[in-house]
Image (tube, grey):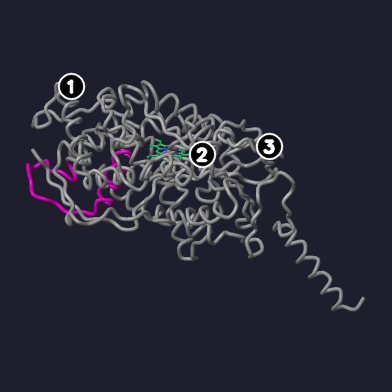
Amino acid sequence: MPFWETVLGALVVALLGGLYLSGFFRKRRPKEPPLDKGLIPWLGHALHFRNDNVDFLQTMQKKHGDIFTSLIAGQYFTFLMDPLSFGAIVKEARAKLDFISFASQLVLKVFKFESSEMTHKIIDTSSTKNLKGDGLVVMTQAMMDGLQMVLLHCHGSSKGEKSWKQDGLFHFCYNTVFRAGYLALYGNEPTQGGKEEEKARQQDLNHTEEVYVEFRKYDKLFPRFSYSLLTLAERIQVKKLWNYFWDVLSMKNVYQKDNISRWISDQGQQLAESGVPEHMQDRFMFLLLWAAQGNTGPASFWLLVYLMKNPKAMEEVKKEIEEVVQNSGQEAASKEKLLNVTKEMLSQTPILDSTVEETLRMATAPMLIRLVMEDMDIKLSNGRSYMLRKGDKIGLFPYLSAHMDPEIHHEPHVFKYDRFLSQNGNKKEFYKNGEKVKYFTMPWGAGTSICPGRFFATNEIKLFAFLILTYFDVELINQEEEVPPINKTRYGFGVMQPSWDIQFRYRYRF
Ligand code: HEM
């Protein structure tokens, strides 16, 4: 065979092979959901999906209905949009729908950490022990101490200064909650060995500010990094940031601190006992920092901005907080004794609970993904069954399907602080098509991948509200300014961030 014919033949075979592998020839089988591969081989709908999850899913839902399979960057994703059918996915056994395999790929890419069934178990065991029940009492107290330090010694005034200070509200909330949470989890400078307390505190404040600044650099790159969209310079920056965090959070450095949380030390110890190499343990610590600290700061921002834009909500929440403080026998204005808000006090706040739930409904948009482990059937609430194909992924996006569904939540784009307030002691119920909706909000995910830090996270946000509203006067610089819109590039990654910051001023009250 002449040379050029051989080359051409090889090229055609390679092209066909490539197209085959990219799923180009895939056809919809009987009982499978509608299949939409888009126009571009391999990429499929990747660009639309990355640019705006909501717009992509709405467009597809209009075209195909409540379930459809789309090609996205060489992978087939089936999206289920009907919240009444979510149980079929989140309750399914891991042997059929697995979340670890998909999460592991992402974790390896963005944290260079090789996660496994075992590491998931370690997180699970330690979180049950340390972020719930008695463990939660300890963690709530640690967060309280962290917040007191950051709010009163850094943003407030230990010298009795009462003048207004101005800041970006998002920056202020994220910075405060991040630094306090970091101290609660990873401990603080030891004060033994003759080191004065004030000096150690100053070191903690300087260190947490530095870690926050580095964390935000990574945080901003994160969505594009997970979609493999970084430039060369940004990839170099990521490597520098990895090295920084792997060093700062290395077990040998963390063990130098006082008051390390049991949540952190237990997990470090279990990894070591399981034979995980030291450099992997350090990487795991950065993964934990990311999971624990990337959401509560932004959530606290949304809570405060919504309260500031809704005077009635602000008034009701403040009144409730004042009552709880009074009932605890404490006095906020006391110069001698700082306010101590306990887990017990945080369980007496139905109005704040509803306000936090409403905030998370409006500002939290995780994407839940499971890998289909074997060909299987799922039955939807309308009685129809669909086949899922082994190797595909199935995705739920509760932000669109439940949080923003006007049938479930009337006027979903309006902040209503009392939307979740139980009436006559009964938990509020939500309906769609006359049927009760179990998954009416899912800020924490659901099923086997549900956030193990959800109780602690809620307490962090509530503590922040308690302290900020008790100790400070807060107001927007421009009272007419609207709540900034969500930054759409972060859909799928937990709590959303605003497209831009909003200026406010604050003043220590007492
Ligand atoms: C408002 C705050 C928070 C939100 C909205 C949130 C949300 C979530 C969601 C949706 C997931 C599961 C993602 C999936 O299905 O794959 C998750 C996982 C996780 N969260 Fe949270 N989270 C928050 C705060 C926290 C805090 C404070 C901690 C710990 C102190 C924490 C620890 C974790 C961990 C370790 C995982 C991974 C679990 C695993 O893979 O086994 N989260 N979070």
Q: Which mark is residue 83?
A: 2
* Residue 301, x across and y down, in percent: 29, 46
Residue at screen point 43% across, 24% down: 129
Q: Which mark is residue 377?
A: 3
Q: Quadrant of the C terminus?
A: top left
Quadrant position of ligand 1: top left
Q: Looking at the picture, which amino acid does disc 3 mark?
A: Asp
Q: Looking at the picture, which amino acid does disc 2 mark?
A: Pro
Residue 208, relative to residue 197: is it above or below? Answer: below
Q: Is residue 119 visible?
A: no
- In this figure, which residue is indicated by the disc labeled 1? 328
Q: Looking at the picture, which amino acid does disc 1 mark?
A: Ser
Judged from the image, the secondary structure of the residue bearing numbered disc 2 is helix
Q: Is residue 369 magenta?
A: no
Residue 313 placement, left or right of 60 = left
Residue 485, relative to residue 408: is it above or below? Answer: below
Read off the magenta span.
Answer: 153-182
* Residue 456, x across and y down, in percent: 36, 32
